Amino acid sequence: MARLPSNLLALFTQALKSFESSDSTFRVLCSLPSSCSTAAGAAEEDVLPANPPRRPPKYILVLDSSFNPPTLAHRRMAISALSDPRYKTKALRDIGTENSYEIGVAETSAASRVLLLLAINNADKAPKPASFPHRLAMMYAFAQDILAVSAEQRVAENNSQSALEGEIRCEAVDIAVTTQPYFHAKAEAIAASDFYHGANRLGQPEGSGSAGNAVNSEQVYLAGYDTLIRIFNPKYYPNNSMKASLDPFFAHTRLRITMRTDDDWGSAAEQISYLDELRNGKLEEAGGKVEWADRVELVQGRQEDEAIISSTKVRDAVRRQDWEALRVLVGEDVVFWIRENNLYINEDR
């Protein structure tokens, strides 16, 4: 189990207040580099700073959730994406010239980064059952878990000689907040932020970017099948505004949808059939564009013999104080945080 900073809650409380008092709609509060997976995780007393990438990452793997709490289902989605060959990239070598950034980016971009994104658009209303600072703290523990599992898989691949030389699976995991409620607005806010433009862009100081050069990175949203249903639901786009909202979104963004095979959402075959229906005209009927369906990929979810994981099941297990059941649903560090802070014992916590 990784060691968590003792003042983690206070640091995230302070960072959240700073964000709420600003005009920003998106901010990265903390970054955990891949090196965190090899040691205790982080400094004991300080959250790691929000360090922007030196070069724009080729992919930003966005896991957008309420994280109430982060579960092993969330981890499966992140690790699955990081294991996908299309999101693996080779590490860039420093060329050692003032134009090294310009030369390097023409060949490839830096490794993928995972972005854990928490929407706090109702920050003026007390969130339940876990407060936003507590969720951010659990996201920190969860980020360490992602890096540790990714590193273990990397070692296993190296031992089997199946990994490419110089390959980096995940450069860092970023923890961020946003006030935007919808995917297309979140994507725009991330692109408008200069965080992912690369701190070394032609020697420019960090913070000198603009939304126009953010297209170097492609955002990939990791979501469940229920999200696919919602994102193409016309009721979220008044006055037939789906095209205006989603056209810019799908220009530089894709959806990586994990199938949910259960009584509520149907079989894998039915979910694949739904995507085919979108391609065959259903998306246009809803007010969208058929080519958007090509920006959606469906991936396998849990195996039939694996337990169904949900945040509701986590909270139920905590209220029963069934700690063995809880360990099947969330990582050890999240278990520790929940128990240490008495989260989810009562509905109002």
Image: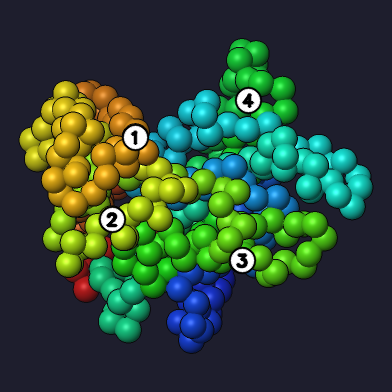
Left or right of residue 172, residue 25 in this image: left
First along the sequence among labels 2 and 3: 3
First along the sequence among labels 4 and 2: 4
**Disc 1 marks which amino acid?**
Asp
Left or right of residue 251, residue 160 in this image: right
First along the sequence among labels 2 and 1: 2
Label disc, if present, on residue 243 of the rendered structure: 2
- Residue 251, image x, y percentages: 43, 48
**Disc 2 marks which amino acid?**
Lys
- Residue 343, image x, y percentages: 31, 65
Q: Are marks 2 and 3 in contact (CB under 8 Å)?
A: no
- Marks 4, 1: nearer the viewer: 1
Q: Are marks 3 and 4 in contact (CB under 8 Å)?
A: no
Q: Are marks 4 and 1 in contact (CB under 8 Å)?
A: no
Residue under the image location 45 percent in, 62 percent down: 188
For the residues marked 2 and 3, what is the alpha-carbon distance in whole angstroms? 24 Å
For the residues marked 2 and 1, what is the alpha-carbon distance in whole angstroms? 15 Å
For the residues marked 4 and 2, what is the alpha-carbon distance in whole angstroms? 44 Å
Of helix, strand and loop, which one carries label 3? Answer: loop
Crowding at mark 3 (Cα within 10 Å: few <14, some 14-19, many 20+): few
Instruction: Name the residue beneath numbered marker 4.
Output: 155
Question: Does 150 appear above or below 117?
Answer: above
**Disc 3 marks which amino acid?**
Ser
Of all residues, the one furthest to the bottom in this rendering is 21
Label disc, if present, on residue 210 of the rendered structure: 3
